[in-house]
Amino acid sequence: MLYEMLDALNSGSMPVIGQHDWTKPLRTMDLEARLVVMDDGERAVRLTGLVDQDDWDSAGPIGGMSFTAMEKIGHAEGLHPDREPISLSADHGWFDDDAIAQASTIMSQVVPVDGNRLLQFTAMELVRVVIEISYNTLVLLGPNLASSAIWDGLKYLLTHRKTRDGCEHAPSRIEISTDLGSGKVVGIIDTADPKIARAGLRTYRKAVDTAGRVAGGRKVIIWKPEDQDGVWSELEPPRE
């Protein structure tokens, strides 16, 4: 794992963001990652380089470097084992394995699902759920994404969060990631209201098509609810 991080950081293929949050990109220069041995004998990755001060300040309190890991807990083959699977990952601090497994089983009525624990360290209370779904699967489901078993499983998960004192009203962050080959689209929905999440899912396919017209790189799009529905907006890049 540490050697994979070294290669990704030194090659520039691992994005650097604040608080595991795609809306807080950190512009960097001259990054160098090295493997070091700590005083207690444990190995660690030490990262040095330059970070844009405005990006650093806007990211909130940063006490060190962290990374997100996914630990697979099972595979729900479902009714169509020949279809391309999707990946469902949920923050282990907020969702237990049984809730992730049940949500995966519900979703597997339309496609196979890999269920994962999402492991991360952050100072922010962010109830994070990540769905990785291919463009081919989006085409397969068409406009029915918000009325399919994918939505039913997501709704189940959102309504089975762990109870944590003082965090009852923390919004859930739903991240939907779609690889287009020439780039990747990451859709973000922040809400505690399942109806708002469903409205975003309803038009996600169209938003991916629009964002994907600009080839290359990673496009982050954010769902902004309005009176009756909402709109997907591309994250504005940081000012130079």
Image (cartoon, helix red, strand yellow):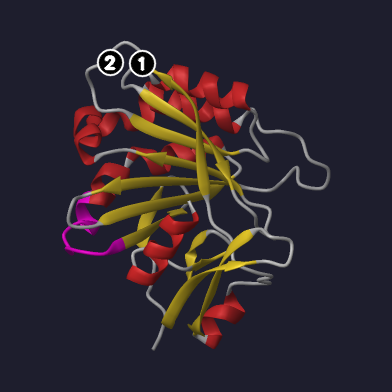
Residue at the extreme right of the image, as rendered = 165
The front one of 116 and 131 is 116
Query: What kind of element bears circle 1?
Result: loop
Q: Which residue is at 39% across, 66% downward?
A: 235
Q: Quadrant of residue 14?
A: bottom left
216 inside magenta stretch: yes
Instruction: Kindly identify the amino acid type of the residue bearing the numbered disc 2.
Output: Pro
Residue 169, given in percent of the width and then of the height, sits at 72, 46
Q: Is residue 31 above or below residue 164?
A: below
Residue 107, given in percent of the width and then of the height, sits at 41, 22
Q: Which residue is at 37% across, 60% downward?
A: 220
The front one of 63 and 180 is 63
Question: How many residues crowd mark 2 within 10 Å: few (<14), some (14–19), many (20+)?
Answer: some
15 inside magenta stretch: no
Residue 120, given in percent of the width and then of the height, sits at 60, 50
The reply to whether residue 147 is visible in this rendering is yes
Q: Are marks 1 and 2 in contact (CB under 8 Å)?
A: yes
Quadrant housing the C terminus:
bottom left
Residue 81's tag is 2
- The residue stretch that appears in magenta: 209-218
Q: Which residue is at 45% across, 34% downward?
A: 88
Residue 31, given in percent of the width and then of the height, sits at 44, 79
Residue, disc 1: 77
